[in-house]
Image (cartoon, grey):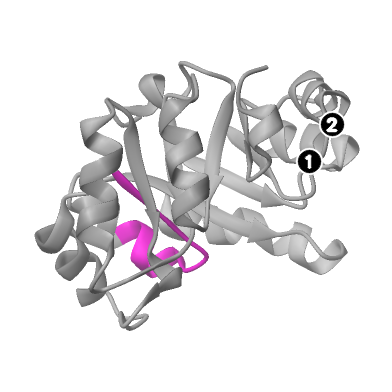
Amino acid sequence: MHPLAETLLDEPVIAAVKTDEALTAALASPCSAVFLLASTLLTVDGLVHRIHDAGKLAVVHIDLVDGLSSREIAVDSLNALCHPDGIISTRPTLIRRARHRGLLTVQRAFILDSLSLTSLSGQLEQGKPDFVEILPGIMPRVIVEISARTQVPVIAGGLLRDKADVMAAMRAGAAAVSTSAPSLWDI
């Protein structure tokens, strides 16, 4: 496991941000990590620096950096540009490349049906991420099933709206949750 994996789990809730206002709130929160879910090639460096200056881990959703391609060179480019602590991606090839470059890796998976649940194991085997983030994160039964099938720690993300959602995900076996709801960042 990546050396920063424990730091990512210092707090059970990870701030997921899409706006400057949300980032400002996340930096003032007790969250130890920030998932950056929106940026461009022109803004990502400054955003990552702000996160690092606040003493938090910066994990960039590389698929959502406007201006980057979905090719492996995007990992090298992002790393050279802003030195994030890690990346999030739905693409196993980018996860594998980031892992080889020494970055913390979070493979995001949308669990929409039985087929996406079945294919997840193969995707995780291909990318070998440090974490798998499943969306939506409000499916405790699915979290239990995924946790039983893989050694990859689960992060539950998406549609977590209150403390009960967070607690249900954690009881089901999630190692952490990611949420864009500032009201949940300090529970």
Quote the CA–CA distance across marks 2 and 1: 5 Å
- Residue located at (9% from left, 61% from top): 80
The residue type indicated by label 1 comes to Leu
First in residue order: circle 2 vs circle 1:
1
Element on which disc 2 rests: helix
Are there few (<14), some (14-19), or many (20+) residues within 10 Å of tag 2? some
The residue type indicated by label 2 comes to Asp
Residue 122 is inside the magenta segment: no
Quadrant of res 154: top right
Are there few (<14), some (14-19), or many (20+) residues within 10 Å of tag 1? many
In screen coordinates, is 80 left or right of 92? left
On the question of residue 152 being in view, the answer is no
On the question of residue 173 being in view, the answer is yes
Q: Which mark is residue 165?
A: 2
Foreground residue, 145 or 104?
104
- Residue located at (69% from left, 64% from top): 119
- Residue located at (63% from left, 53% from top): 121
* Residues rendered magenta in the picture: 86-96
Element on which disc 1 rests: loop
Q: Quadrant of the N terminus?
A: top left
In screen coordinates, is 113 left or right of 92? right
The residue where tag 1 is placed is 160
Q: Quadrant of the C terminus?
A: top right
Residue contact at pointers 2 and 1, CB within 8 angstroms: yes
- Residue located at (70% from left, 30% from top): 183
Q: Position of residue 122 (x, y in %)?
A: 58, 60
Q: Position of residue 112 (x, y in %)?
A: 82, 65
